[in-house]
Amino acid sequence: MGLKVVRGKTLPIGADLGSTAVKLAQLRRCESNFELLAAGSEDIPQDCRSDFQNRLQFISQSIRKIVKSHPFRGRHAILAIPAADTFLQHVKLPIMPAEQIAKALPAELQGKLPFPAEEAIIRHVVAGDSRGEGDTRQEVIAVAVGRSTIDRYLSMARRAKLDVVGVNIESCAIVECFARLFRRAADRKRTVLFVDLGAASTQVVLTQGGQIAFARNLSCGADALDTAVAEGMGIPVNQAQALRRDILAGDKAGAAEDELYHLLETPMAAIADELTQCLRYYESVFTNGGVERAIFVGGGAYDKRLCQSLAQRLNLPAQIGDPLMRVKRVDGAG
């Protein structure tokens, strides 16, 4: 699922098809770094988010609009599909070649998928050797997407005049965005927790160096936080969302922010509990040391107090991750 970089070449357009927004970006390799050639986004209207066909139609129109109004080069694109449309499952298998893993996974996933295994496109990542009683086994992360779902995204992309050369999932995209953190030999032994705080869900990814060792989709995201505020204050959800952003954009913390986070206690505790369970699973499988730090990314990472609270509950040092931190922005990129 990795992206091959050709020196001096413009990369395909990256299309992040999120639950609340569609975002496009295109990079170019420049000597030892990257340049951002073009970028743009469109929020998906609330009334389109719950209807798959309406959502795809809006995304297709938005892509055409963004590409036309920004200096994108070419039509080759890689789609990152939403977590809600993907299924992740950790599977333990005997040591075997990759082609045998691919053959074994449909039977392993039978009855666990939200759709028949024969109607799924299944890929996998070998996370590493797992400890256990007796023989050593492989920890494999299976990734499944309904074939009809992929077909509909590809059809949407064709209507948007994109030439799709690859499809990615959010977990893999996160690791690829931060590959620079693991360039040195010493960094390849580090274990990092990535927490992608999206609107509809939270992605949890643990990496050993640049290799994915754990991945899970959590159903609780920023929408749950807005709902908690709305219910606690008796206001509409969209008003609660705006209130959260306004309070957090203030220069000084005060009583209003404290009251806000009192209302967020229950969903924050639920997210922290899920993250703790993920860490416990990882530590039960691998023996290469503990997690060094947490990196928060995604739209919900703008809420620094939320990230700090989660990090404290996990007892981990943490930071906000910016995948474009060392990327030079070309004038007029957007």
Image: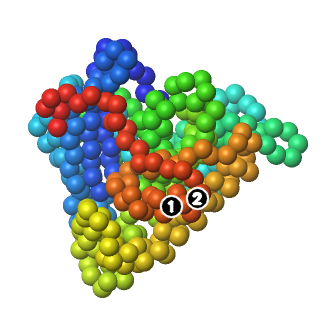
| Nearest the eye: 38 or 188 | 188
Label placed on residue 186: none
Name which quarter of the figure residue 43 lies in: bottom left
Q: Is residue 232 left or right of residue 44?
A: right
- Whether residue 84 is situated above or below residue 262 in the rendered picture: above
Q: Residue at x 50, y 42 (%)?
A: 121
Q: Position of residue 127 (x, y in %)?
A: 64, 38
Within 10 Å of the Cα at label 1, are there few (<14), some (14-19), or many (20+) other Cα atoms? many
Residue that appears at 65% across and 29% down: 98
| Residue 232 quadrant | bottom left
Count of numbered circles in the view: 2
**Is 112 located above or below residue 213 in the figure?**
below
Q: Quadrant of the C terminus?
A: top left
Give residue 25's position: percent from left, percent from top: 27, 36
Residue name at image x 33 percent, y 68 percent: 253
Amino acid at the residue labelled 2: Leu
Q: Which mark is residue 310?
A: 1
Query: Judging from the image, what secondary structure is the residue with disc 1 in?
Result: helix
Amino acid type at mark 1: Leu
Give the residue number, with chain letter if any, for mark 2: 314
Looking at the image, residue 71 sits to the left or right of residue 269; the answer is: left
Vertical order, 40 against 72 (above or below): below
| Mark 2 in CB contact with mark 1 (< 8 angstroms) | yes
Percent x, y of residue 244: 30, 68
In this rendering, position of residue 213 left or right of residue 37: right
> Can residue 110 be spotted in the picture?
no
- Hey, which residue is sitting farthest right in the picture? 134
Residue 319 seen in render: yes
Considering depth in this image, is 24 or 160 the residue closer to the camera?
Answer: 24
